[in-house]
Amino acid sequence: MIVTTQKPLDEVLDFISPYDNILLVGCDGCTQPPRGIREARTLGQLLELGGKLRGKSFTFKATTTAKQCDPYLTASMLKPQIEGADAILSLACGIGVQTLAQIFPVPAFPTQNTHFMGAEEREAGILEERCAGCGNCLLAVTGGICPVARCSKGLITGACGGSKAGKCELSPERDCGWVLIYNQLKRLGKLELLKETRPPRDYQLKGWKVTA
């Protein structure tokens, strides 16, 4: 099960303000509360109204997938619908957003903050962490690649400077998360996002109890 909460509408509107045609993608998978086609359509209506209040007109198309984190399933379901879209808004968890960003050439933005991810035990396999459930999703400003999960140090303000040939200094077999972010933002023409400053990470959003 994955638990998410809705990002503020103003924050989501800021993400999509440079774009006109938005594909809203729900997920019928494990997110609680459900974030499927009904929720995608409702969010589209709210964002359309919010855009008008800002003097901006958007065209929204709502759809959903059975499991957004499955790249093969998601690609087959969404490729016929992506044509004409300038950007994608995902109602899935952070893993779903990153899957969309990996598959499609347009920017993918989160509409949710992911707080918890848990599942029943399954037989051992090879897994790669893509979302740390930090409670304040940064994927909109990092090219759809999570710095908390993909950087060994969980840095949210840029690279540490210790990577070599695109690999992490702590795990030489592991790609440097911030090199991946840089390359993705360069591909999207959004390198200016690296110049933005962000406040320190609030660990209480993850549900951790922080004491002095």
Image: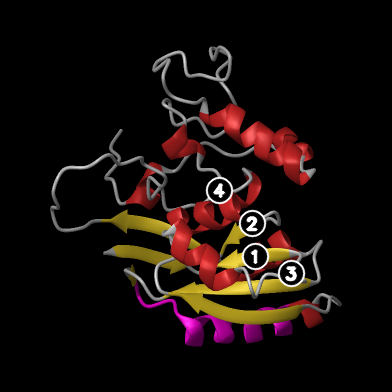
Q: Badge 1: few (under 14), some or many (20 or more) residues near its Cα, within 10 Å?
A: many
The kind of residue on which mark 3 rests is Ala
Residue 166 x %, y %: 57, 20
Check contact, mark 1 vs mark 2: CB within 8 A: yes
- Between the residue at mark 2 and the residue at mark 4, the CA separation in whole angstroms equals 19 Å
Residue at the right extreme, as displayed: 55
* Of marks 3 and 4, the one in the foreground: 3
Residue 207 x %, y %: 30, 51
Q: Secondary structure at mark 3?
A: loop
**Closer-to-camera residue (185/49):** 185
In which quadrant is the N terminus drawn? bottom left
Check contact, mark 1 vs mark 3: CB within 8 A: yes
Q: Badge 3: few (under 14), some or many (20 or more) residues near its Cα, within 10 Å?
A: some
**Closer-to-camera residue (164/46):** 164
- Residue labelled with disc 3: 85
Q: Which residues are magenta?
A: 32-50
- Between the residue at mark 1 and the residue at mark 3, the CA separation in whole angstroms equals 7 Å
The kind of residue on which mark 2 rests is Phe
- Residue labelled with disc 1: 88
- Residue labelled with disc 2: 104
Q: What residue is at 32 percent from the left and 68 percent from the top?
A: 30
- Between the residue at mark 3 and the residue at mark 2, the CA separation in whole angstroms equals 10 Å
Q: Secondary structure at mark 4?
A: loop
Of pointers 3 and 2, the one earlier in the residue sequence: 3
